[in-house]
Image: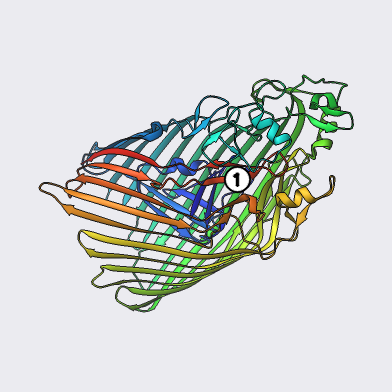
Amino acid sequence: MKITSGGNSDFINVRGVGSGQNPGFEQSVATFVDGDYRGRSRATRAALFDVDRVEILKGPQTTFFGNNAIAGALNITTRKPDREFDYNFSALGGLYGEFQLQGGVSVPLTDTLAVRVAGRYNGSNGYVSNSFTGLSGPHTRELIGRVAVVWEPTDNFSSTLRFDRGRNRNLETYNAQLLNCPQGACGVFGGALVPGFDDQLDKRTASPPTYSNYDFKEVAWTNSLDLGDVSINAITGYFDHDFSQLTQQIPAPVLGVGGGGLLPVYTAETYKSYSQEIRLQSRAGGVFEWMIGGYYFHGDLGTNLYTGFRFPVRTPFGLLQFGQLFPAAYNAASPITVNLMTSQKEETKSGFASVTVRPTPGLRVNLGARYTAVDKSAARSVVFGTAGADPSTNFVAGPPAATAFYTAITGSNSLPFARPSRTDKKFMPSIGLQYDIQKDVMVYASYTKGFKAGGYGFSTRPDIFDPETVNAYEIGAKGSFLDRRLNVNLALFLSDYDNLQESNTLFVNGQILTVINNAAAARAKGVEGGLSYRVSPALTFNLDAAYLDARYRSYPNASCTIGQQLATPSGTACVQNMAGKRRAFAPQWSGSFGATAAIPLANAELRFSPLAYFTSKYFVAPTADPLLEQSGTIKFDATLAIGPADRRWEFAIIGRNLTDRTTASFRSSAFFPGATYALTDPPRTVAVQFSIRR
């Protein structure tokens, strides 16, 4: 599993499959918090707070996690109020101004009612220095709080109500570094204006200012009634978020017309969703178990995108500003800006059921099915006008003739969606076999049909994409040996995807284009293995490794690489056949090796936890572009802690990326021909942390 921070969204990939960075995509790896679906990728990191456990479920999760979980699910369970008073608190401080204060307290109010209050405040002053702004980034300040209430008036009824509220205010969040910058225009913009400007991945940039703001609210209400042989379970969820950010698609040290960067992009997103799930299920442990349920989801999504064209363009009359291209309304000082507004309403209705049969004591047959119908309607508008340095503050729409002119020369399209509403339906069966070879050793095999609805591209063109489906097969084994001191897991998988939804951002002839389409066929196959060996109560080793082969099988109309675009004559469409080429974020090899050692002291113990994790090279864009490839790397973390064996308190020194390897989480083609830009991963960091709990 790989979670990567990108420009407009985060990327979550499992076994080489995930969703691209377009707001119109649902997440192929779905996030669930206490059973409640979080539909936007930006909400994933906010969910990793005050957790009881986190489960990474690989492959399509159609029966029990049916909302778009075609590649997997991140299932997060938060800490619940305890029946007894308890608390936990931790404080962390480290390099680059990193800090984190986190804590929670559970209070029993009565014999049947308990409440838990938790909060976290964290931030950093940033590790990428910006010679243009004089600041470092990402400069983050993030605050999140949670209140959870559990009411259990009888032995057979339980009700849990949770409310989350988060607020992030971050500066220099898109500190992209311009790379592979050829001489000519790119070199002039770089070195000629800012001394020391370079095009290496070295945690230095000269980008104009960027920022991001994020606010969210979530309410989740879970009720369970045990009727003896059957139980009724209901999950009600509400989620509301607002996200806004300013990025610079040309991270070069130049101010454009009207101030700000040459190609500033301001994005605002609002999203509200409501969901309701009800399940009726039998008591577990019998020869025959069953479950039946229904699910309803409603989501409202709106985006407002402003892109400022503040750079000169080459014409037969020489270099002209965008305003000079339409002299009927504008001039050289006019800060031309396009405003793209897109909205979407979604309704998902599904019914699901599962059956487990135990024909013999060691054999289990698991059958599941879900039928889903997804209704979507969308609208869009594209208007050209003018705006200030931050395009969100004072946009003034221009005449319709200006919009018609600029859409034509920039390759965008102001037409509405050809089909403003759509319905996608799918029946998704699954079957699995589990057999206990002996006590603590189990083998299994499964087949699952997965589905993710089609939809609308939130981009400068009225793209519509079709549903994607998958047939997923897996066999494996899980076992414990040597008196449960050795635990071993092994899985072999093959997933065939049809109409895989893809998105790619291109800069072609001075134009920024987002291309959205469906890859006809792709296959992800591989082997995963893991083991944990407890040598003694004081020493445990862990090893995980994976081999992955994720490639396109048929994709004749894929976007071109940067080199192919440069070799294509101006005005000619550039496509490539991606059949046989590897998918993005799909390293052939990856894994980790770690250990946990505890050394007894007089009244405490010393704990040491080193970890090495590695990955082979992989592409970060769905074009198999060698300029958009992250090389293979190995990184090392370690934690050295001291405290009592029961961990009532602990003092720890935490090191991350101790060998200071420089890598990039995200790469993209840049405005300048042949150039790229990247977002740098954190360098070596060291922090100290004190924690206490009851």
* Vertical arrangement, residue 693 with respect to residue 366, above or below: above
Give the residue displayed 14% in from the left and 47% down from the top: 604
Query: Along the horizontal axis of the image, is 398 left or right of 68?
Result: right
Q: Residue 125, image x and y in percent?
A: 44, 30
Q: Residue 335, image x and y in percent?
A: 74, 23
Is residue 234 at least partly visible in the picture? yes
Q: Residue 556, image x and y in percent?
A: 75, 61
* Vertical arrangement, residue 594 with respect to residue 461, above or below: below
Q: Residue 381, image x and y in percent?
A: 75, 34
Viewer-side residue, 309 vs 387: 309
Viewer-side residue, 616 vs 384: 616
Residue type, mark 1 in image: Arg
* Vertical arrangement, residue 73 with respect to residue 144, above or below: below
Q: Quadrant of residue 528?
A: bottom left
Q: How is the image coloured?
A: rainbow
Q: Quadrant of residue 17?
A: bottom right
Determine which residue is flagged by label 1: 667
Disc 1, SS: strand
